[in-house]
Image (tube, helix red, strand yellow):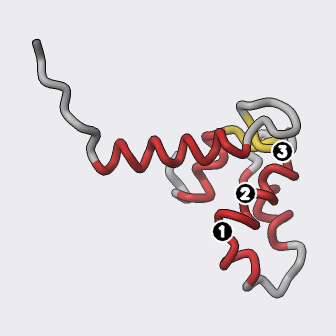
Amino acid sequence: MAKISSPTETERCLESLIAVFQSYAGRDGSNCTLSKTEFLTFMNIELASFTKNQKDPGVLNRVMKKLDLSSDEQLDFQEFLNLLVPGHT
């Protein structure tokens, strides 16, 4: 019987990113995307310091629009990753 190794640090980080995305996605629609409301909730909870330090109230709307490469007003996981790892695609 093969020994199952424990996940690497990178695997744990990826699992965490997926879990966080899934915890916000689907609250008001598809569980595969973040709506604008879900994205704003994510930002206000998970990136609260960044959000609170913004002097421009429209910054989050612009971030969402920039991330939404498909222009469907939803962020899929690939688009979401651009927030965390800019230029990864």
Mark 2 or 1, nearer chain start: 2
Q: Amino acid at mark 3?
A: Ser
In the rendered structure, the answer to whether residue 9 lies left or right of residue 84 reads left
CA separation, marks 2 and 3? 10 Å
Q: In the image, 3: left or right of 8?
A: left
Q: Are marks 3 and 1 in contact (CB under 8 Å)?
A: no
Residue 22 falls in image quadrant: top right
Q: Residue 57 falls in which quadrant of the image?
A: bottom right
Viewer-side residue, 14 vs 77:
14
Tell me which label, 2 or 3, sits earlier in the chain.
3
Query: Which of 56 and 49 lies nearest the eye of the viewer?
Result: 49
Where is residue 75 shown, x and y percent of the image?
Answer: 74, 43
Q: Residue at x 72, y 45 (%)?
A: 24
- CA gap between label 2 and label 1 equals 7 Å
Q: Earlier in the sequence, mark 3 or mark 1?
A: 3
Looking at the rendered structure, the secondary structure element under dot 3 is strand
Q: Which mark is residue 35?
A: 3
The amino acid type, in three-letter code, at marker 2 is Phe
Residue occupied by mark 2: 42
Q: Which residue is mark 1?
A: 47
Q: Say if mark 2 contacts mark 1, CB within 8 Å.
A: yes
Q: Tell whether 17 sits left or right of 66.
A: left
Position of the N terminus, as image quadrant, is top left
Q: Nearer the viewer, mark 3 or mark 1?
A: 1
User: In x, y percent, where is residue 8?
Assistant: 26, 44
Helix, strand, or loop for circle 2? Answer: helix
Front-most of 48 and 77?
48
Identity, as a three-letter code, of the amino acid under mark 1: Leu
Q: Residue at image x 74%, y 75%?
A: 51
